[in-house]
Image (tube, rainbow, N blue to C red):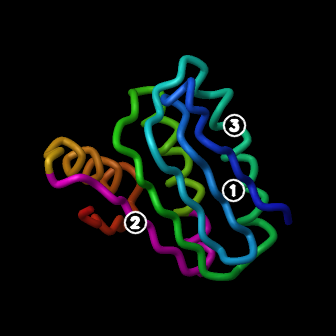
Amino acid sequence: MENLMIKEIPDAPFYPTVNFNAEKGVCEIVGESYMEETFKFFTPLLEWLKEYTTQNNQPLTFNFKLTYFNTSSSRLILDILDILREYKEKGNEIKVNWYYDTQDPDMEDEVEDFMIESGLEIELVKF
């Protein structure tokens, strides 16, 4: 399976960097996510993750390093978390980390909401 990489575009800082590494079983989304066509951006990520979770049973680590995301991004983040929950329910090992700035108290609340809605444990990691 091919890795999925999307580099941040300097002229469009509202698109996050994506690095989904199939060999290592590590996926990361880094930066800000508040593009206009959110679904169009996230569709290949969701498709890659669905394919990965149907073809593999190795441990998977997912790192969110988002400093900002809009409401439409949060809906698609929940879709990612749903795929991860289904993977875990099949008996596979997953670890979800959410890196956040301690100066942003709202992010902790957002992540707690994601945990409640997805049913997944998300490790909050301060940076």
Residue topped by disc 1: 49
The residue at the point 69 percent across, 56 percent down is 49
Residue 116 pos. (x, y %): 30, 53
Taking 68 as reference, is 77 left or right? right
Q: Secondary structure at mark 2?
A: strand
Work out whether 51 lies above or below 114: below
Q: CA distance from mark 1 to mark 3?
A: 10 Å
The residue at the point 59 percent across, 56 percent down is 83
Work out whether 72 lies above or below 22: above
Residue topped by disc 2: 97
Q: Secondary structure at mark 3?
A: helix
Q: How many marks?
A: 3
Residue nearer the viewer, 79 or 15: 15
Residue nearer the viewer, 116 or 97: 97
Residue topped by disc 3: 43
Q: Quadrant of residue 31?
A: top left
Indicate yes or no whether the magenta region holds residue 16.
no
The residue at the point 28 percent across, 54 percent down is 100
Residue 19 pos. (x, y %): 63, 57
- Closer to the N terminus: mark 3 or mark 2? 3
